[in-house]
Amino acid sequence: MNPEPHLIRYSAAVCQTDAPNPIDRKQMRSNTDRMLTMVDAAVAGAAPFLPVRLVVFPEFAHAAPVFPTVRELLEKLTVPIPNEHTERLAGKAREHDVYIQSGTLLEEDAKWPGVVFNTTCLIGPSGILYKYRKVNPWIPYEVHSSPHDLPGYDEPLFPVADTPIGRIGCAICYDWLFPEAIRQLAANGAEVLIRVSAYMDPWGATEPMSWWTTINRARAIENLAYVVAANQGASLRLYPPYSWPGGSQIVDFDGRMIAEASPGPGERIVVGPVDVSALRHERASRIGHHMLSHLRTEAYPVYAKHAYPPQIVDPAERTYEKNVELVRDAKNGSN
């Protein structure tokens, strides 16, 4: 615990995974088993130093969309939330008094029949604090739905949790290539921005195309926020046709790299300090380089025009081919 109650300073642990991708719901349990062990290791490793209060896992840590159709995903891998996996993580959060950003789950929801969401949950000692559904699936390959595209969807797209360790928001992988998505989290109050990703080579953590690092640092700078980013560490053998470079990172509100896992596949736990008190001081005292308060919203008419998707699509019809068609229509302005 913090020696001075008015200070909010703790360690965050980013835990990148390297596990076989389940092909049915039963196989997901072993992934969750390993994640619980990694939480124990992260907490124990930091115990003599600045204690861990936040643990973050990457996209697809629980299950990846290894089937190409919505029908197969619904038959074999989707789960409702809450479920046994989130309950076990909640038990671990209570045991260690930590907050855990789960790996993503392929979610089914009775309110939205036939829809697959790619979802991550922030889980604390009291249970689930929010669930975030990926707003920007990695099209054309990902066939799960964006909540943005569902007529009548009325839940917050970018929830933020106010916790004893700061105001926390999360977005998933490709979401981070859209600066407006992360800006909305900051506008909703987020101080610690969590990225759960399965960011593959060649756009990963090494030059000449280190998009992973470039984007993490840019989003921290432009939103005056910490970025805690966990990337998938699976090898090509486990999740073809891509290899997964890891390189999980913690970046401070000025874009400084606080901690970084060595690039390359494999399990890693990297731990670094998050000083929310310092962040709040900077946000309150800065005049320059405070982009959140310098934003001229009316200057950007691009957001007044609808772009994607150019048409409403039945979620069950989401396929690689359909996504390609929608992208082409959007490029041609067919909306």
Image (tube, rainbow, N blue to C red):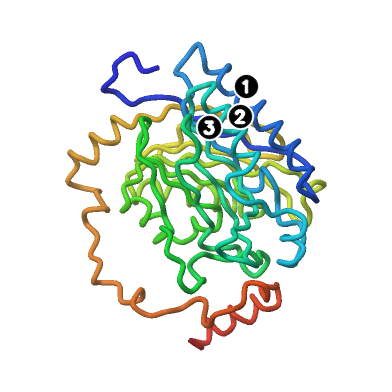
Give the quadrant of residue 240.
bottom right
| Neighbourhood count class around disc 2 (C-alpha, 10 Å): few under 14, some 14–19, many 20 upward | many
State which quarter of the image contains the N terminus: top left
Residue 49 visible in the current orientation: yes
User: What residue do we see at 61% from left, 43% from top?
Assistant: 103
- How far, Cα to Cα, is label 1 from label 2? 9 Å
Locate residue 17, reporting x and y percent: 68, 38
Locate residue 53, reporting x and y percent: 46, 26
- Give whichever of 60, 93 is nearer the camera: 93
- How far, Cα to Cα, is label 2 from label 3? 10 Å
The residue that mark 3 highlights is 55
Three-letter amino acid code at the position of disc 2: Ile
- Tag 1 secondary structure: helix
The residue that mark 2 highlights is 269
Camera-side mark, 2 or 3: 3
* Residue 41, disc: 1
